[in-house]
Image (spheres, rainbow, N blue to C red):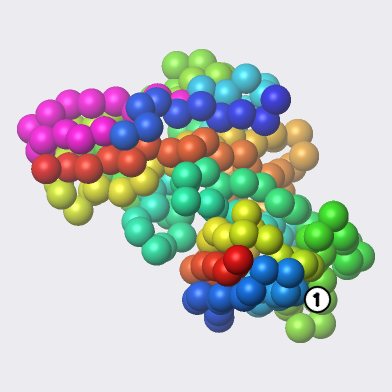
Amino acid sequence: AQKVTQAQTEISVVEKEDVTLDCVYETRDTTYYLFWYKQPPSGELVFLIRRNSFDEQNEISGRYSWNFQKSTSSFNFTITASQVVDSAVYFCALSDPSNTGNQFYFGTGTSLTVIP
Amino acid sequence: DTEVTQTPKHLVMGMTNKKSLKCEQHMGHRAMYWYKQKAKKPPELMFVYSYEKLSINESVPSRFSPECPNSSLLNLHLHALQPEDSALYLCASSRKDRGRGAEAFFGQGTRLTVV
């Protein structure tokens, strides 16, 4: 069964600190896809990154970086020099390729508060 | 343009009312979704449409009735809802040609309150 675990429910950091959001997943599939989404108070889920199971290269996009390690089934997300605008709920998700649609399995989310 | 537009943004309805939520995208995506999200919880999948045909129904009660009139529009018809149906309803869309791992783009949601 597919499962995504985000053990950190809430995190608070002071502006300009670095913060890492953890994501651990479970799947029996050899082909799968991982995602991170940001949900600000406005409600919309904003797509941040997609990674397939065959691409273990880490990725950096501005202040954001992602560390994908298949050996530990983890897909962690780091924000460098955090800003108040980073305050949001962040969801890690797994896409199950065996369904007829793109069914996303979401983690329970991590609520990040950046204190000015 | 990666926009999914949902209307209305807020909706208050009585338990005997009939209302509809609307979702529109012009990205050429052929998969569209309805999710329900309660406060402090992750989104829960309700329905998936693939090429305008219903492909997944996650055992949603019949008081929720989806409709996909064309490749750009997705509706969710509501009838005889219960107060526990109050939630944020999110619409999303994704490409099909990247296989089943395509990212989904979400709308801002409709905050529904059933009184």
- In the rendered image, residue B35, in percent from the top left (x then y), is placed at 43, 46
Residue for point 43% across, 38% down: B109
Residue at image location 28% in from the left, 40% down from the top: B112
**Rendering quarter of residue A101:** top right
Residue B115 vs residue B25, the one in the foreground: B115
Query: What is the tally of numbered marks visible in this picture?
Result: 1
Location of residue A2 in the rendering, given as x and y in whole percent from the top left corner: 58, 69
Looking at this rendering, what residue extends furthest in the bottom direction?
A: A72
Q: Give x and y (percent) for residue B20.
A: 29, 25
Amino acid of disc 1: Lys
Q: Which residue is mark 1?
A: A70
In this image, A75 relative to A5: left or right?
right
Q: Is residue B22 magenta?
A: yes
| Left or right: A36 in relation to A106 | right
Q: Which residues are magenta?
A: B11-23
Name the residue located 75 percent from the left edge and 53 percent from the top edge. Answer: A50
Q: Looking at this view, is A21 or B96 the one in front?
A: A21
Residue extending furthest toward the top: B70
Say if B1 sits above or below A110 in the image: above
Q: Is the residue B64 above or below the residue A105 in the image? A: above
Would residue A95 be counted in the magenta stretch? no
Q: Residue furthest left?
A: B16
Q: Is residue B94 visible?
A: yes
* Residue A25, visible in the rendered structure: no
Outermost residue toward the right?
A57
Element under label 1? helix
Which quadrant of the figure contains the N terminus of chain A? Answer: bottom right
Establish if B24 lies above or below B48. Answer: above
